[in-house]
Amino acid sequence: MPLIFDNQFANKFPELCHAQKIQPDGQAKLRWVNDTLWKSLSHDSPPKELADWIAGNRDWLGTEPVAQKYAGHQFGHFNPYLGDGRGLLVGQVKTANERYDLHVKGAGPTPYSRGGDGRAVLRSSIRELLASEAFQALGIPTTRALALVSTEGRIQRETIEPGAMLVRVARTHIRFGHFEHCLYRNLEDSAKRLWQHSIEELWPSTADKTVSEQFRYVVNATAEMIAKWQAYGFVHGVMNTDNMSLAGETFDYGPYAFFDAYKPNHIFNHTDHAGRYGFMQQPGVGLWNLKRLAHALGLFAGDAPVDDVLDDYEPVLRQEFLKVMKQRLGLTHVDDDETCWSLISGWLMLLETYQLDYNLSYRALGALFNKNSQALNGPLEKTATEIKSKGQSWLSDYSKAVANKPDTATMKQVNPLVILRTHHAQYVIEQAEQGDDKPLTDYVSALMTPFDETHNNTRWVLPPEPGQAPAELSCSS
């Protein structure tokens, strides 16, 4: 059965988008496709025409591509001139129970390109693909990658790079910035209808509630998403309001990174000179962005106390962070939150002081207490040895709290052996640029099954070599 399109956004909000077709960029080659995700949308295998559909070389029946218009705060400064500058929302796919957006990134220039070429490069497309599927496996809300094609185009970024197009799947592509645009242009009716449409799509059970009560779902979803970022050592890199999804899905992957060694003050995005979007700032930025959205909702919310809902943000974030960290540290049977917070604080201090590998350390800790573990060798063995030699005081407190029996079963289910690492992503990109897609396929497969001990002897577990400089990324990433 082919994809069934039900293009709500293009039909309901023509004033908030520009209709145009995907602009071809030469012959297209399918480099990767998410067969499982495709079948969940269509109950069929991807068709042989898929690459040409994505690249605009053949009409994709049922789609009504549009570039969306929005505004946003970028590094704290309002910019009214934003919009889809290199991507098109090609339509919404209807399944038995839900509707999903399909978006093609690299589809050519639009009225919102601001002088840009409207194209995407293979490097950044692969980085988004890897992050999307890694997040899905970790249980962190995210957009998904459906398919990747390369094109004949050569694209100017910091250097000349091969072109690509990526199909992204999301619950919605409606951003905080959509409502900021409506406020800036005083489009009260559009904002109200867009909000109602969003609520009906994302939280239909709240359709009859007040705007404030509905906004609480956005606040909570955003808080829970960022709590998971913090628990897994993820730095988004560019948390502008136009990069914030109303659904609380991680969105617009750019200069992101997971920690190797735990350096919470390191800035990966070298264009973020003030460190606004650093790891430790992410929870505060999330709240700041929600305040911008709350202000925009005031255009139609009337006297509803939308701002009051923001008081929920920090407690929800802290509770979600505590829940995930208790799972990661095997503290699920420890009822005293004060004890848990103390152990979490001490653990993070240990990792930072001795520059231990962030995610491998959780896995190694579980292996130390799991007599049945078969995975305590290689980099895990090295990390476990460091924890034992440098964390004796913390381990003593930890052992007492868990009575020498941490919840190792849960630890294995939530602590990845394979995490998305920048140096592995770069290797995959370099091989793909040479025409070899096997490393990409292998790495995606490993990221989709990150807790499996069979990965222990593969290259994808290995952290960077000692002394290897931390990655520096830019918004073109």
Image: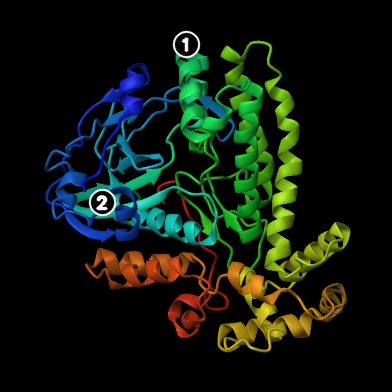
Q: Residue at x 36, y 43 (%)?
A: 96
Residue kind at label 2, given as amino acid type: Ala
Q: Residues within 10 Å of mark 1 (few under 14, many from 20)?
A: few
Q: Residue 287 in the image: state x and y as whole percent.
A: 67, 36
Q: Residue 4 in the image: state x and y as whole percent.
A: 26, 39
Q: Quadrant of residue 108?
A: top left
Q: Does residue 121 appear anywhere in the picture?
A: yes
Q: Nearer the viewer, residue 120 or 182?
A: 182
Relative height, residue 452 to residue 229 (above, below): below
Relative height, residue 412 to residue 203 (above, below): below
- The residue that label 1 is drawn on is 189
Q: Residue at x 54, y 48 (%)?
A: 237
Which numbered mark, 1 or 2, is in the foreground of this view? 1
Question: Which of the two discs, 1 and 2, labels the residue nearer the N terminus?
Answer: 2
Q: Residue at x 61, y 41 (%)?
A: 222
Secondary structure at badge 2 equals: strand
Q: Residue at x 51, y 23 (%)?
A: 195
As drawn, the label of residue 164 is 2
Which colour scheme appears in the figure? rainbow
Q: Residue 338 in the image: state x and y as whole percent.
A: 88, 58
Secondary structure at badge 1 equals: helix
Residue kind at label 1, given as amino acid type: Asp
Q: Residues within 10 Å of mark 2 (few under 14, many from 20)?
A: many
As drawn, the label of residue 157 is none
Q: Nearer the viewer, residue 243 or 315?
A: 315
**Side of 367 relative to 35 (left or right):** right
Q: Nearer the viewer, residue 388 or 52?
A: 52
Q: Residue 124 in the image: state x and y as whole percent.
A: 37, 53
Query: How far apart are the alpha carbons under marks 1 and 2?
Result: 38 Å
Residue farthest front in this picture? 96
